[in-house]
Image (cartoon, rainbow, N blue to C red):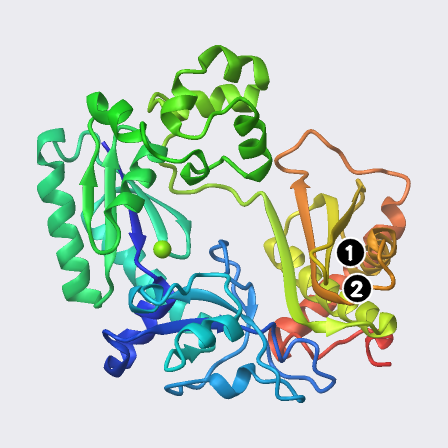
Amino acid sequence: MKIHVDLDCFFVSAERTRDASLMGIPVAIGGRGDPYIFSHTAIPQQCNLEVSGAFLGTFFQSYDAHTDDRAKFIDADGRIRGILTAVSYEARAYGITTAMSIREALERCEHLIIKAPDMQLYQHLSRELHSFLHTRIPLLEQASIDEFYGDLDGWIADEDVDVFINTLRHDIAAELHLPVSIGASPTKSIAKLATSSAKPFGCKVIRADEVLSFIEPVAVATFPGIGRAMQRQLSRYNIQTLGDLVRAKALLHAMSPYAASLYTKVCGHDDDAVSPHRPRKSIGISRAFDPIMDRPELRRRILILSRHLAFAVMRLNVLPTTFRVAIRYEMSQHTHATATRCRLFHEQWFKTLILTLFEQAEQHRRLRILHLSISCSQFTCNSKRTLSLLEFQHDTTGRKLSQSMQQMQQKYGLNILRWGSELS
Ligand SMILES: [Mg+2]
């Protein structure tokens, strides 16, 4: 069987490992953009390229611990800013959820403790859990900062899986002081679904002959891989639960190859392997901030993000060919622009391209901007694309310069070299 191990409200649980006073009370982790990356004075940034996953910043700031960081979420005009990225079960009892605004959360529970995220601590604990799991499970895959898959086939007999995962759960709590939930089933996606139904601090095994009855009442939105667009498509055919979906085999197969593969997954028949070394397929950086109208300032911010991302691309030693800029405006407006360039990567043309994409994506110039993200994908090593020879000579020179900059940044810090256009 395959198992899925998921840390329960990880960021909150992580804070509790170093501050026991946070046990048993409503606690949340809040995000209010990054107060450092856009600063006009250079502040050292740290870079971690090991794991990528939701809410995990590649670049982050070292952090000093306080019990409550509420002051960090109040802006110059005394308004409460930011959203919650993790919520304890005690806080959920007040109706507080992940992605809720901090202002609304405080209205629901005024004694809620709010802490700023400490990525360094979370990454450290994630690595500890990874090493610990390795001592028990030979074939292990890290899916995100707080999620792992393990393959027990040929290692633990199916009838012993209940005892094995239950022991594992208690041993992790005893050794690392972190609560996890564990699901087991013949496939990864059903194991993940089993974990969600076992939370918090629970275990659940779904055997092959139990899959259909287990998924029957589950809402389609709960299944990994069914996004909003897919949900809308399914609800047009009155498919609300996974049970409804299983009964619509012909429809799903006619819809798209993706829908057909989803059908196999929902039935518990796919054979996705647990793979310890999944190659990275993309890299990006994004930041949220208090709403900004000032376009030159936004261009400065895009350049800063480009510089950071260029550093990461060079460090990973990959050659991306697809580039994307996405903008989130106030009033729930989103836009994006993408481009394909088969050129040898270096910072000079990269920042120019990103600025151009930013201008293309800008469709609501009368609205303030809250969030910017840029990303690179389709690395040449994974795709059939080859680099254009036309610009090769010029790009080789640019790349040499980028490489020397890279060496200096690695030695003296990411902010040692900044583009002149950022400093205005
Ligand atoms: Mg989790």
Question: Residue at (28%, 75%) from the top-left corner?
Answer: 16
Q: Residue furthest top?
A: 250
Front-lying residue, 108 or 252: 108
Q: CA distance from mark 1 to mark 2?
A: 8 Å
Quadrant of the displayed image that contains ligand 1: bottom left
Q: Amino acid at mark 1?
A: His
Query: What is the secondary structure assignment of the residue under circle 2?
Result: helix
Residue 15 relative to residue 47: left or right: left
Query: What is the secondary structure assignment of the residue under circle 1?
Result: loop
Q: State yes or no: discs 1 and 2 in contact (Cβ < 8 Å).
A: yes
The image quarter containing residue 405 is bottom right
Residue to which mark 2 is pinned = 401
Residue 387 relative to residue 51: left or right: right
Residue 260 relative to residue 68: left or right: right
Q: Quadrant of the N terminus?
A: top left
* N-terminal-most mark, 1 or 2: 1
Q: Quadrant of the C terminus?
A: bottom right
Percent position (x, y) of residue 340? 79, 40
Percent position (x, y) of residue 117? 46, 73
Percent position (x, y) of residue 336? 76, 49
Front-lying residue, 148 or 232: 232
